[in-house]
Amino acid sequence: MTVRSSTTRSRSTGPATKEHGIRRTTKSTFAAVAIVVMIPLGAEPALAAPPDAPIVSILPFEEHALQAQRIAPYGKNGEERWRVRAHFVVKNNEQKTIRLTQTMIGYPNGPGEASADVKDTNDDPMVDSRDVAPGKTGLFIVEDGMARPGGKGGDRSLFFPMPDQVQVKLKFSGFFERVIHTTRLRPYVNKTPQGSYLFPAKHTDLDGGQRWSGGIHAFSRSQKFAYDLGVSRWDKAAKKWTGLVGTDDSDVEDYLVWGKRVHAMASGTIVRCTWSHPDNKNVGVDDHGVNNVVIDHGNGEFAMYAHLQQGSLNPLCPKDGKETTYGLNIPVVAGQYLGLAGNSGSSKPHLRVHLTHGANAKMFAGNAASGLPLLFRDARNVSTIKKAMIGPGPFAYNPMKGQAPAAPYNLINLSPLPLGIP
């Protein structure tokens, strides 16, 4: 049976509560209860029905389903998890401007609902990013399953088996009932023959005792599944993991990731090389463009490697005195050298890598490119290092088998490095 996505007008459910790592909706039955609603003088009562404001698209969406991301377990013998990180477009068919104030995500046959207030992200005090004008569309985000050890607020873990449907509810100011959008849900599989990618680095590029470390990039349309990658070592004196050579962090060369070699995660064709932007030498200052390489893997997935050092890109990339944009056709193979991790277009050295369904983050096929889950298969993962919750080792890494790293901050072990730090 095919389940089609739909947007409906329906009464919202009751409040959500936390239970065993997920939110479950509790219901109460009331009989013959009179409810008195006090409306302030001069205020308009909320309309009973929701606005005519359907979700007209939600991404990443393939094969009639919203695509979720697989996540490696946190600890030894832990359970595989999944998360939703999506953006959606609302069409306002009303005759007046409407304001989205809350999103709620749930699963008709799975975990309970989780809600989040929608914040105004526009710095202009005269413009509210939550508003959608009549006849216009608005772009918004929804996410779930972004739990981390010690996390607070709306964080929660979502474990397999994954439900086959997801339901997004939208609350608009001045409207009592919510707009409801229901569609299929399935885990994303990369379109390589192995269903995943190699990690963009090699163990031979690290010095003794070093490990790659990862973090989740800030939410954006094309980079919502992006990773910000660095290198860490165990500081015996401070008894914590650090990404610095010593204790100073004011210069780019103070960072272990600076100058680390970056490699192609799969075979494909380089379609863009941006190579001429200077590195920001002063940490904390971002005043230059981004050097990057974009690879078309020939399967509908494009990989971007960003913040590379000026002048470090593979000699195959043309350097003809001007920026080369798109239209290149340079074959590369999996594991081939691309450049060095740097600090171009960034406030501190790191490597950003992400997948999209298009070659750039600009207009592509009538719409901006959407980020896709990037899954690894040749690395081991343990989390989390942000709160020094793991020591120097030895400790167990979980092999990533077509999964994302476990947490916003983690260590990544590349075979055949030993498990833990001797």
Image (cartoon, helix red, strand yellow):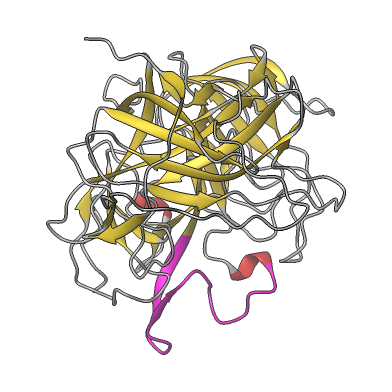
In this rendered view, identify the residue nearer to me: 276 or 179. 179
- Residue at the spot 51% in from the left edge and 43% down from the top edge: 103
- Residue at the spot 70% in from the left edge and 50% down from the top edge: 120
Question: Is 238 covered by the magenta stretch?
Answer: yes
Q: Is residue 293 left or right of residue 189?
A: right
Observer able to see residue 131 = yes
Q: Is residue 126 left or right of residue 360?
A: right
Q: Quadrant of residue 404?
A: top left
Q: Residue furthest bottom?
A: 237
Q: Residue furthest left?
A: 77
| 168 up-or-down from 252: above or below | above
In this rendered view, identify the residue nearer to me: 149 or 41. 41
In this rendered view, identify the residue nearer to me: 257 or 73. 73
In this rendered view, identify the residue nearer to me: 311 or 109. 109
x, y percent for residue 363: 70, 20
Q: Quadrant of the C terminus?
A: bottom left
Q: Quadrant of residue 367?
A: top right
Q: How many marks?
A: 0
Q: Quadrant of residue 234?
A: bottom left
Q: Is residue 87 left or right of residue 251?
A: left
Question: Is 248 covered by the magenta stretch?
Answer: yes
x, y percent for residue 261: 51, 47
Residue segment shown in magenta? 231-251
Observer able to see residue 199 = no
Q: Quadrant of the N terminus?
A: top left
| 340 up-or-down from 148: above or below | above
- Residue at the spot 32% in from the left edge and 49% down from the top edge: 32
| 252 up-or-down from 174: above or below | below
x, y percent for residue 146: 39, 52
